[in-house]
Every structure is written in C-alpha cells, then in structure tokens.
Image (cartoon, rainbow, N blue to C red):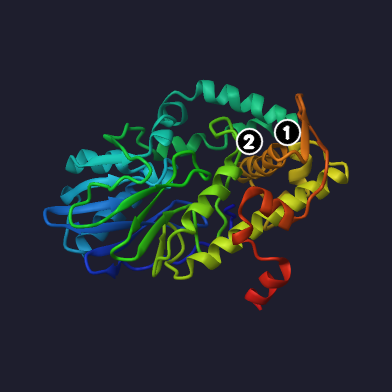
Amino acid sequence: MTTSRPLRPMPEVELVRDGLWSIPVPIPQNSLAYVLVYAFELDDGIAIVDAGWDTDEAWTALVGGLETIGASVSDVRSNLITHIHPDHFGLAGRVRDACGGWIGMHEADAALIGDRYANVDELLSRSKRWLADAGVPGEFEWDLRSASLKIREMVSAVQPDRLIADGERVDVPGWDLRAVWTPGHSPGHLCFVAPEARLLLTGDHVLPHITPNVSVHPQSEHNPLGDYLNSLRKLAAFDPDEVLPAHESRFTDLHRRLRELVSHHLDRLEAVQAGIEEGRTTAWELAEVFPWSRPWADIEPFMRRAAVGELLAHVRLLEEIGLVEALAGPPTIFRLKARSPGPEIAARLGVDGLYDPPDVAARRTS
C-alpha cells in the first residue's frame, strides 16, 4: 500500500538493453513519484508499455523521454497497458490521438473502464453499500467514497483497440514478447515476458520493495488475494536475468522477491486471525489495528479505503479456505472457525514452495 512518504527522486531516461528504454513519467502528489514507461524500438517506430497519468506534466515527460531516445510520440505504434489504474492507463488515449497506434489490454480490465471512469454514479452507489458492509462509521463514509473522484480527471476513458490474452505473443515486431495474465492487483493485470532477452516486465504485480495493494472492492473479483498468490506462483516458472517493474527500480532476484511477497501476505493472514480472535469483528475494526506501515490515524481517506479493501481481501481468502465465516450485515461480522499458522495456509494454497519461514526470512534480511 502506498503512503505519504517523501517523494522519490526522478530517475533519468535509461537504456535497459539494446533497443529497450525506461522513461520515468511523474505521478502528481503521490509518494510513488513516477511510473516507468518502457519503450521498445521497432523498425518503423516505438512500442510502449503503460503511459502515465493524463496530466500535462506527464505528457511533457513522456514526449521529452521519447525525444531523448531519438523518437517522437507520433512514432508510437502500440501501447501495451499492464492494467487500468490511472498511472498506467490514464494517458493512453492522448497518446493514441497523437500517433494512431493501437492500445492493448486484458479483457477483464477493459470490461471495467466505463463503470470506473465514465459513468460512475452506479459505482458510487455500490461503494456506499460496500463501505456500510465493511462497518465504516457514518462520519467517514463520504470521505472514503468520494476519495477517488479527482482521479477521474487524470484518465482518458478510452476503449482498447485490441484485447491481449494470457500467453499471447504480442504484436511487437522484432521482439519475442509474450503476455502473462496475473490477476490480483487488478482483475486483468498483465505482465510481459521477453524470453530471448531474459527480461520480465511486471507492472505493479511485483515491485522490488513495495507490496502492491490487493483489495476487495465493488469492481474486484471474488477472491483477489487468492488470484494474486496464484499469479505469483505462475511467475515462479520464469527465471529472468532482470525484472522491469512499473515503479521504483529494476532488480534481479525474482524468486527471492516472490518469496518475500508470499511471506508478507501469510503474516497478514495470521494477523487477521489474531484480530478476529481478539474481538475485532468488522473490516473497519480489523483495519484500525492492522500492522500498516504507519498509524491508522495518519492515513488519509483514499488510502484508508484501500486499506479496508486490502484487509477484506485477506478475510475473503480465509473464508475461502474455511477458517473464517461471515455473517451478513450490514455490517458484515466475521467469526473465526479455526486458526492456522502461515506454513499450513501456504500448503493449502499451494504456495509453500514460495514461503520463507520467519527464521529464514530473518536471515535473508540480516
């Protein structure tokens, strides 16, 4: 989950491999600071992965970054979108207007565009019911429900020209680039593997230090954390020389990071069980005492909503494996049926091969 920490310094445009560049595009008023847009050189132009927010500052940075590598926005032949969040998808329509290149994304995210960014009244109504069900006190409800309305201004809600399927060899001439469907952070999140170059582009699915938000919310799949952990296991089949995430910086040890992410979520599944056992029975009550990166009182409304959704994703997974039961509300009340430690949960979920027990995890960070 992102926080209001000091902004990261913007990196320079970088050459990743011959013919492949990293272009940082700023994110306004966000501790992530920038999204990394990757640009593949083609015989007749450029293919980019993600685009940035639809702001003039982001547009200027993207155009300037392309000029740095000897190209222009009119050279963009395709824009591959890892997922529909604003810092990845927001600028895609403006890019397409300038170059005529096609936009591609997974169908599960494409199906959400109108509901999320164009006709939001129904989504706001569903959000109100969702927040009530989560036990959010009435005095906080509107702040949490309306927190993302400003973000709509930073997205051009266009439809993609092509849908990209899991395993598809993507139309990026001169590059062996294949799509890997990795739902969890969003229902249609895509990673892209370049086997010949031994590279893996991970979007927000795997970042070197930050744990991406995986939430239950009105547009999420039924069990997003279960999907996310399965997607981590899916990536374990690859052994790239370098991982290219959408934020922070490139890194090399994919499998170590996969183990860290699985271990993180197993620790939080244990924390949810402990919270329910201690008498915290609604999502809001559990979120108030959950081990976030900073005190609950210091978390702004948008991130509180993300935190409640993340908490619910952990509870939903515990429901799915029979450790928690939910009593219909509003608000929904959670009861603990049984309690299992992390290693047992990992085995039940089939991710025990990606789990570091606490003593191993401590040695890795010492």
Numbered disc 2: secondary structure = helix
**Nearest the eye: 245 or 150:** 245
Residue visible at 58% across and 40% down in the picture: 224
Report which residue position mark 2 lands on: 144
Determine whether, in the image, residue 319 is placed left or right of residue 62.
right
Within the image, what quadrant is residue 15 found in?
bottom left
Residue 323, placed above or below residue 40: above
Q: Is residue 295 visible?
A: no
Image location (x, y in percent) of residue 77: 19, 47
Q: Residues within 10 Å of mark 1 (few under 14, many from 20)?
A: many
Numbered disc 1: secondary structure = loop
Determine whether, in the image, residue 326 is placed left or right of residue 185.
right
Decide: marks 1, 2 in contact (CB < 8 A)? Answer: yes
Residue visible at 60% across and 32% down in the picture: 145
The C terminus, quarter of image: bottom right
Residue at the limit of the structure toward the right, as seen here: 278
How many labels, in total? 2
Determine whether, in the image, residue 53 is placed left or right of residue 145.
left
Image location (x, y in percent) of residue 124: 56, 25
**Nearest the eye: 253 or 65:** 253
Residue visible at 48% across and 25% down in the picture: 120
Q: Residues within 10 Å of mark 2 (few under 14, many from 20)?
A: many
Amino acid type at image mark 2: Leu
**Nearest the eye: 317 or 57:** 317
**Nearest the eye: 266 or 78:** 266
Q: Is residue 44 visible?
A: yes
Label 1, label 2: how many angstroms apart (C-alpha)? 9 Å
Residue at the limit of the structure toward the left, as seen here: 44
Report which residue position mark 1 lands on: 136
